[in-house]
Each structure stands twice: as C-alpha cells, then as structure tokens.
Image (spheres, grey):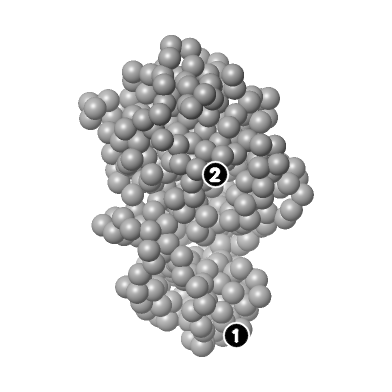
Amino acid sequence: MIDYIIVGFGLAGLAFVEKLKNNNKSFMVYENYSQKSSRVAGGLYNPVILKRFTAAWLASEQLELALPFYKNIQDNLGEALVSELPVLRRFNNIEEQNLWFEACDKPVLKTFLSSELIRNENEALDVPFHYGRVKGTGKIDIKKLLSLYVLDLEKKESLIKESLEHNELAIETDFIDYKGLRAKNIVFAEGFGVRNNPFFNYLPLQGNKGEYIIIKCKDLQLKEAVKSSIFIIPLGDDLYKVGATYNNQDKTPDITTSAREQLQMKLERFLKVDYEVVDQVAGIRPTIRDRRPLIGTHPEYKNMHIINGLGSRGILIGPYVANKLYDFIENDGSLDKEIDIKRFENLR
C-alpha cells in the first residue's frame, strides 16, 4: 500500500507531490495532460495586483515560502528554472502615478513597491508617464519545470500517463483502491477538470480562460516585464509572451482569433515597432467566485482530498496551500475557513 494517489499534475499537483517527497511519503501520480493552464501561464511571481496597486492575498507569507520551494526543485533537477525579473508598471496618466505613491505609503505594500519613478529609455515603447517598479519579482519557467519533474517521476516509476476513472475507485474506511492499487489517501489536483469529478463537482469552480500570444520583436530589446493593460514578458531570443486575456464564458481549450486581436490591439497602444506573432496558447484557469483556493477533505470520505482553485497566482499560492493540506491530513492541523471547502457544503 502506498501513502497517496495524486490526480493531476499542474502547479497544485506539483506542490503537493514535492511536499510528499520531502516527507518521505510514497505516491503515484495520474496525469492525462487535459488541463493546460499551468503550462501556458506567464510564469511571473509578483506579490502585487497591478491593476489596483494592492497586495495579493497573503503575499508576504507566500513569497517567503515559494522562492525557496522552487529553488530547491531547481537544485534537485539541475536545470535553471528560477530567475529574477524586474516588473515595471506603465502609468497611463498622472492620476495612476499619484495612486502609486499613495500605495507606496501603505504598510502592507512598502516592502513591494519602489517609490522611485523610472524614466522610459526604450524607444520601442510609448511610456509618457514613467514606470513604477515592483520589488521581489521574477520568473519561473513553468513549462520546463513541469516537463523535467515529469521525467523524474517517470524514472522513479511514480507516474501513470492516463486519466483516472472516478467510477473505478473503491472507497474503504482505511484506504482507497483503484484497479488494485491501494493508497491511504487520494488527492485531486485536477484544475478545471474537477468539473468531471463526481466527488467534488459540486464545488463552484467557474473557470476563466486565458490566452497569450508569443511575438518576435528584434527592436524591442526588453530586459524587464512591463505591465500596462497587458503584460510583456521577455523570453529571450527576441521572443516575448504577451497577455493575458480573461474570458469566463468560453470554456473550450482552443485558441481564438478574437483573443489574438484583443491582445494585439492592447499591445499596439504602446508598442511602436514592428513585430510578428509566432505562437498562441490557451488554458482555463481554475477560479472561484470568492477568489480563494479549494482545499480540504470530502465531507463523506475522510481519505479523499482536494487542492484546486489556485487561479492566476498559482506559482505563489501552490506551495502555501500544499503545506496547509499536508498538515491538515497528516498532523491533524486546521484549515483557515477562507480556503476550506467546508464553506461550500450547502451546495452539495
């Protein structure tokens, strides 16, 4: 008998698996690659919501935990995955600039926002009102991270590349049996795919489709991530990821012409040089109406758990909630009400 079956391997699944590895727990991962939101995400870690100049939920705690978490994985895999990357917020007018200064004076944001304005020196960009700089930012190569981690799981025979059939689960008092494989616990980390999970599909996971375009632009020569109405994130070799869109109506995994046109329209408001769209990617973020993750244990089956709803900030949230769930299962810890799935028990 193993300790855990993990279903799904995006950022949520990875965070929980890493916690299991660090605590010498045995596990098997099932991954069918149907969910792409983690693999296509921008990869930035950024503690500030730059639309409104507010700190992200538990930003300090999550950042303090996440950076050592990813650097440890980087060291174990032996590949460069984590890099510091400045994030600059382009001001659209004087009012935004003044709001930035007000935000800099707030105790919760002083650590993250620089009060020193940055003048634009890149002739490829139209930036009439300077930049504000966010401190403590960087980039994780999520696609590479997940790919390398999967290869490591395969070497250790801890990965099964197929869908888990929920109706084949036999739930006993002290274990879960799945086609002869017995585990003390099962954890679902299926992202938006949880809508097909008969045990947890009552949870109000809405899903928010995000699309990015990848552009090639030799004249941009950008060394920082720039946020205006969209992000421009440098990838190297004159390539940049531009996005993202937010669409809570379209739940298909396909890229769309409308999203590409929307992103290009926003980009061309301040990019003044020629570029070429060389790729486009899409994924459905697992989002919740109250903007908090879905963590906890099934109300009826005590060896069945979930880690989901990380939304667009999964890089920072993942390690934090993985710790919370592990402590809850293994050490009789408590879950904060704002993340515990018990808050939605009335929807069953």
Q: Is residue 73 visible?
A: no
Q: Which residue is mark 2?
A: 161
Which is nearer the N-term, disc 1 or disc 2? 2
The residue lying at 38 percent from left, 44 percent from top is 193
Residue 144: x, y in percent? 63, 55
The answer to whether residue 170 is above or below residue 216 is above
Query: In the current view of this chain or complex, which residue is farthest to the top?
Result: 173
Query: In the image, is 339 to the left or to the right of 39?
Result: left
Residue 157 drawn at (x, y percent): 66, 36
Location of residue 257 by image quarter? bottom left
Q: Amino acid at mark 2?
A: Lys
Give the mark count: 2
Q: Is residue 305 left or right of residue 16?
A: left
Of the two numbered discs 1 and 2 in the rendering, the one whose residue sits closer to the viewer: 2
| Cα distance between the residues tagged 1 and 2 | 42 Å
Give the x, y percent position of residue 90.
47, 70
Say what amino acid the circle numbered 1 marks: Asp
Q: Residues within 10 Å of mark 2 (few under 14, many from 20)?
A: few
Question: Quadrant of the rendered structure where residue 348 is?
Answer: top left
Q: Is residue 182 visible?
A: yes
Q: Circle 1 sits in a helix, a strand or a loop, which is it?
A: loop
Tell me the element at label 2.
Answer: loop
Q: Residue at x 59, y 74 (%)?
A: 239
Q: Nearer the viewer, residue 178 or 110?
A: 178
Looking at the rendered structure, which numbered label has been put on residue 141? none
Q: What is the quadrant of residue 120 in the picture? A: bottom right
Report which residue position mark 1 lands on: 219
Q: From the viewer's side, name the closer residue of 190 and 28.
A: 28
Q: Is residue 219 positioned above or below 259 on the image? A: below
Q: Which residue corresponds to the image point at 63% horizontal and 26% vertical from the top-left? A: 26
Which residue is rendered at x = 27% and y = 33% of the image?
A: 202
